[in-house]
Image: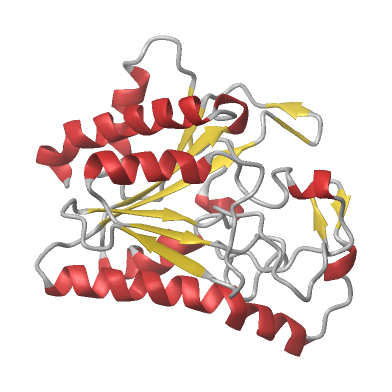
């Protein structure tokens, strides 16, 4: 797995891969990149800090890209670090632009004005969600109601507490998609599967799916993989294959 997601000289806030894929699945990667755009320096952090989960979801993009390839599914990824602005948070969230992430202070995010925060929303948050909205609308118009699947990773230890789950399935009251995925994962030997663990929608981590799926009554699910299980390209591909296979198996039933 690469240490960082490379971005060209011109800042690219969002990237769509396989936009005309035939699968009803629409893959989303809110925290794909740890890239800090020019003009923000490193937000006062070290390069080592920027490799940590506070800046992105390590391994998530590699898994999502493999799923996109195997399923022939579109993938929308944010190309800017969650430390600039978190695309998976509502605009009124206190951690939309975090000044503290886990136990780490973010000096470059301290004491920002409303206009400075608004500039960051325009830079990354707004274009990411506009891209998703456009894809959802075009697929509905084409008679292919999308099934939204957000790919994330989580740390094995959070604020000193160990997390035993290998993978977590996050869902709201609509379990049409979550239930068969949970069943498929639980049938795999050796996997510890969390149901609304280590997060749930009550933790305000479900914003992207609330915004794009709930209002249109689209099927949706968030998949969280423990990031020590996707530290290599081979592991990313293995998890991508595993999840693509499960989605393929449920396609005829619920997609």
Q: How far across and how far down the image is residue 213, in percent? A: 33, 63
Residue at 21%, 62% in the rendered image? 20
| Residue appearing at x 69%, y 69% in the figure | 37
Q: Which of 254 and 51 is in front in this view?
A: 51
Inspect this view and state whether residue 167 appears.
Answer: yes
Say how the picture is coloured.
Answer: secondary structure
**In the rendering, at what x and y percent does residue 191 appear?**
45, 17
Instruction: In the rendered view, tell whether residue 190 sits above or below residue 230.
Output: above
| Side of 152 where 28 appears, left or right | left
Say which quarter of the image contains residue 38.
Answer: bottom right
Q: Where is residue 139 in the image (x, y as percent from the top left)?
A: 19, 68
Residue 79: quarter of image: bottom right
Vertical placement of residue 119 versus 243, above or below: below
- In the image, residue 222 sits, relative to residue 41, either above or below, namely above
Residue 180 visible, this orientation: no
Q: Which residue is drawn at 26% across and 60% down?
A: 218
Vertically, is 122 above or below 54?
below
Q: Nearer the viewer, residue 42 or 204?
A: 42
Q: Which residue lies furthest to the front in this view?
A: 9
Which residue is at the front of the view, 111 or 180? 111
């Amino acid at each position: 797995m690469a240490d960082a997601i490379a971005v060209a000289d011109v800042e690219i806030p969002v990237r769509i891969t396989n936009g005309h894929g035939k699968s009803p699945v629409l893959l989303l990667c809110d925290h794909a990149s740890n890239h800090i755009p020019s003009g923000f320096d490193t937000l006062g952090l070290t390069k080592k800090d920027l490799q940590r989960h506070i800046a992105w979801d390590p391994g998530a993009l590699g898994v999502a890209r493999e799923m996109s390839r195997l399923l022939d599914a579109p993938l929308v990824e944010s190309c800017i670090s969650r430390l600039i602005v978190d695309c998976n948070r509502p605009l009124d969230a206190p951690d939309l632009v975090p000044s503290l992430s886990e136990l780490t202070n973010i000096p470059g995010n301290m004491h920002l004005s409303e206009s400075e925060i608004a500039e960051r929303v325009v830079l990354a948050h707004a274009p990411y969600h506009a891209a998703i909205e456009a894809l959802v609308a075009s697929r509905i118009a084409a008679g292919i109601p999308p099934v939204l699947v957000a790919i994330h990773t989580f740390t094995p230890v959070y604020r000193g507490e160990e997390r035993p789950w290998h993978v977590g399935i996050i869902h709201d009251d609509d379990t049409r998609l979550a239930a068969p995925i949970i069943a498929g994962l639980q049938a795999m030997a050796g996997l510890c599967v969390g149901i609304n663990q280590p997060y749930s929608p009550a933790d305000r981590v479900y914003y992207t799916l609330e915004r794009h799926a709930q209002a249109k009554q689209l099927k949706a699910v968030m998949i969280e993989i423990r990031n020590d299980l996707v530290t290599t390209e081979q592991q990313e591909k293995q998890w991508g294959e595993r999840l693509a296979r499960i989605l393929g198996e449920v396609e005829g039933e619920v997609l």
